[in-house]
Amino acid sequence: IVRLSPSELVSKYTRPTVRALALWGYMDTRNSLIISAALSECERLNVTDVLVGDNADELFGGSYDAYFDAKYEFDPMAWKEKRDGMADLPFVTRTLADWYGMALHQPFTDRDLFVTWALEETGRSDCVARCAVQSTFGGL
C-alpha cells in the first residue's frame, strides 16, 4: 500500500512520470502519477511482474456516463456502442512499467485473451446494475 497525500504524490512523482513518458499533458500526467507511485514501490520491493486492470472498467461499463446516464438504461445498444468504442483506449502503464523495470501483464487489453469475448458476449445488464449504496463520511 502506498500512502501519500495528493501534494506528496504530485511533488514526488511528477518529474519521474514526465521523464518516463516523455510528455507533459495535464490528463496524461495526472492519471499516471498514482501508477508511477505504485510501480516505484514495486521496484523498491524487488517485484518483477505486475498484473494490472487496464481496460477492465472500459469493457465492463464504459465511462462514468455509460454507467449512470439514464439514456443508456433504456437503450442497451447505445451503451454497447459507447462501450465498444472505448475498448482500445491507449494506456501509458506499459511505458511506466518499462521505466521501472517491471514485466507488465494486461489481460484486459489482450484481444485474443479477453477483449473479443467481452465485446461479443457481455452487455449492459451483465456489467451495470442498480443497487442501494450507503455513503458514510468521516471514514469507514
Image (spheres, rainbow, N blue to C red):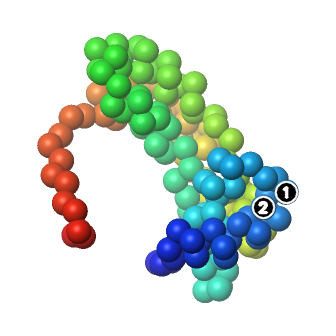
Disc 1 from disc 2: Cα separation: 6 Å
Looking at numbered disc 2 in the image, what kind of residue is underneath it?
A: Val
The mark total stands at 2
* SS at circle 2: helix
Per the image, label 1 sits on a secondary structure element best described as loop
Q: Which residue is mark 2?
A: 18
* Tags 1 and 2 touching, CB below 8 Å: yes
Mark 1 residue type: Ala
Residue depicted at 43% across the width and 15% down the height:
78
Residue 125, located in which quarter of the rendered image?
top left
Image quarter in which the C terminus is found: bottom left
Find residue 8 and report its horizontal and vertical position in percent: 58, 76
Residue sitting nearer the eye, 52 or 19: 19
Query: Residue at position x 68%, y 49% from top?
Result: 26
Circle 1 crowding by C-alpha within 10 Å: few under 14, some 14–19, many from 20: few
Residue 43 place in picture, x, y as percent = 67, 80
Snapshot quadrant of residue 33 = bottom right
Front residue of 94 and 122: 94
Q: Is residue 26 above or below residue 4?
A: above
* Image location (x, y in percent) of residue 131: 18, 40
Residue at the location (50% across, 18% down)? 81
Left or right: 70 in relation to 20: left
In this rendering, the answer to whether 5 lies above or below 130 is below
> In the drawing, does residue 4 fall left or right of residue 33?
left
| Horizontal side of residue 33 vs 65, given as left or right | right
Q: In the rendered image, is residue 12 in sight?
A: yes
Q: Which residue is mark 1?
A: 22
Asked whether the viewer can see residue 48, the reply is: no
Q: Dot 2, how many residues are within 10 Å of its Cα: few (below 14), some (14-19), or many (20+)? A: some
